[in-house]
């Protein structure tokens, strides 16, 4: 083998090695670009919503006795009607030969007529004081106008106990599109859609829920709820909530914090206002705020007063457990809370599924009526209107 042939073979070997190294480098660079592209692919959901598979340890359940049902306040007493005093009888003229009548006769006849209005006025004032006490739940001030004190109105039942105070960290503002599925007691099936909105600036809030049923090419609004109020140390503090069901007239529920009462436009009935009271539109978000603040609070049943369109009752929610739901957003890990029927108050069962990985938003709600009819709302899309933690 000549020297030139040997050098040629060595040169060809070097070229092959260089080509091999170049191909390996290009392959590694191509694979790296592919991995980088996949890792930086834009997410279809905000980063705060990409933790739907967050799993938390369930708290140990602690049994607590249920609170007594809050009774409506007695109706306000109407003021007593004042009776007109009888006119004073004029003294009769005595015959001239007769002796003049004693002066005490005319005075005695007119005294009862003069005292009658004062007595009636005192009764009216007592009735008004009793009405004020029934409305506000606070004792009326003592009557110092006369020597005899007015007897206090007897109390039939002790005042309601204060509600348990929960730590609350309310979720950020968002809008939730929901799919609605209803099955009547006779098996008839309906479908529709709903939208739940929650907005807060940390001091005030607005919440709403609109649900409708699809009928051929149109949509019928079955329920519209709206609520406005403030945020206090107990979480959501409604001021006014409204409901409109189908073609019925809209009703309003008022949370009168100065007077300490809950009143309704649909009835003259009123209830004492308990701390932490909610309305039907705010219940899911208040529960979510309780979970965000401290999950161990679900170790015992959650109780809250809820003002509906005609009454205010106690809701007692129990933690059923962790469940994974199939939604249009994918599989979502949830905590299932249930409010079973309460004899004498409500006969339906209310179930709410909260998603710890989605800011504890309510992602499914279900109402089971006593007849067996079932209405389920399941989330299909969550749109955050501000950045949340």
Image (cartoon, grey):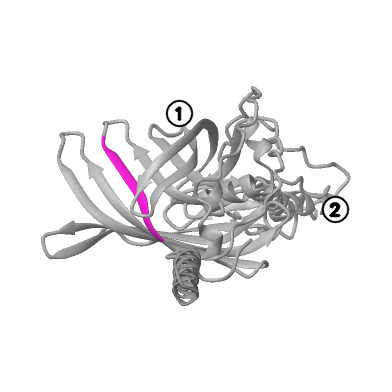
Q: Are marks 1 and 2 in contact (CB under 8 Å)?
A: no
- Magenta highlight on residue 331: no
Question: Magenta span covers which residues?
Answer: 373-381
Q: Residues within 10 Å of mark 2 (few under 14, many from 20)?
A: few
Mark closest to the chain's N terminus, 1 or 2: 2
**Residue located at (55% from left, 45% from top):** 54
Q: Which residue is mark 1?
A: 344
Query: Where on the picture, by quarter, is residue 93?
Result: bottom right
Tell me the mark number nearer the camera, choosing from 1 and 2. 1
> Residue 112: image x %, image y %?
72, 49
Query: Residue 315 vs residue 100: left or right?
Result: left
**Residue located at (62% from left, 35% from top):** 298
Q: Residues within 10 Å of mark 1 (few under 14, many from 20)?
A: few
Element type where label 1 sits in the image: loop
Q: Outermost residue toward the bottom?
A: 4
Element type where label 2 sits in the image: loop
- Magenta highlight on residue 374: yes
Q: Identify which residue, 258 or 337, lies in the foreground.
A: 337
How many numbered marks does the figure carry? 2
Position of the C terminus, as image quadrant, is bottom right
Q: Is residue 77 visible?
A: no
> Residue 216: image x %, image y %?
11, 60
Q: Which residue is mark 2?
A: 145
Q: Outermost residue toward the front?
A: 2
Position of the N terminus, as image quadrant, is bottom left
């Amino acid at each position: 083998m000549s020297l030139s042939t040997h050098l040629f073979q060595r040169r060809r070997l070097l070229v092959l090695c260089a080509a091999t190294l170049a191909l390996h480098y290009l392959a590694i660079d191509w694979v790296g670009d592919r991995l980088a592209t996949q890792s930086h692919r834009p997410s279809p959901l905000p980063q705060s919503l990409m933790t739907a598979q967050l799993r938390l340890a369930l708290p140990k359940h602690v049994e607590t006795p249920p609170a007594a049902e809050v009774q409506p306040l007695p109706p306000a007493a109407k003021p007593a009607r004042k009776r007109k005093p009888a006119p004073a009888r004029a003294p009769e003229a005595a015959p001239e030969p007769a002796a003049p009548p004693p002066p005490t006769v005319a005075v005695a006849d007119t005294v009862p007529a003069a005292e009658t209005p004062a007595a009636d006025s005192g009764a009216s004032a007592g009735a008004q004081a009793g009405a004020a006490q029934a409305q506000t739940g606070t004792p009326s001030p003592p009557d110092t106008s006369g020597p005899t004190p007015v007897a206090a109105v007897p109390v039939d039942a002790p005042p309601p106990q204060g509600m348990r105070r929960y730590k609350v960290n309310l979720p950020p503002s968002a809008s939730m599109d929901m799919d609605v599925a209803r099955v009547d007691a006779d098996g008839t099936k309906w479908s529709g859609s709903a939208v739940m909105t929650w907005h807060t600036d940390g001091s005030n809030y607005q919440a709403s829920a609109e649900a409708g049923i699809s009928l051929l090419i149109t949509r019928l609004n079955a329920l519209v709820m709206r609520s406005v109020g403030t945020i206090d140390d107990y979480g959501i503090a409604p001021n006014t909530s409204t409901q409109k069901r189908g073609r019925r007239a809209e009703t309003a529920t008022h949370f009168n914090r100065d007077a300490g009462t809950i009143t309704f436009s649909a009835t003259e009935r009123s209830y004492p206002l308990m701390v932490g009271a909610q309305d039907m539109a705010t219940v899911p978000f208040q529960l979510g705020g309780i979970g965000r603040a401290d999950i161990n609070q679900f170790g015992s049943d959650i109780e809250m007063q809820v003002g509906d369109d005609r009454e205010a009752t106690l809701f007692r929610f129990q933690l059923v457990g962790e469940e994974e739901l199939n939604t249009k957003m994918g599989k979502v890990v949830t905590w299932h809370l249930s409010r079973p029927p309460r004899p004498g108050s409500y006969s339906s069962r209310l179930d709410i599924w909260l998603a710890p990985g989605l800011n504890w938003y309510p992602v499914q709600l279900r109402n089971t009526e006593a007849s067996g009819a079932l209405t389920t709302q399941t989330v299909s899309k969550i749109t955050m209107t501000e950045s949340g933690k």
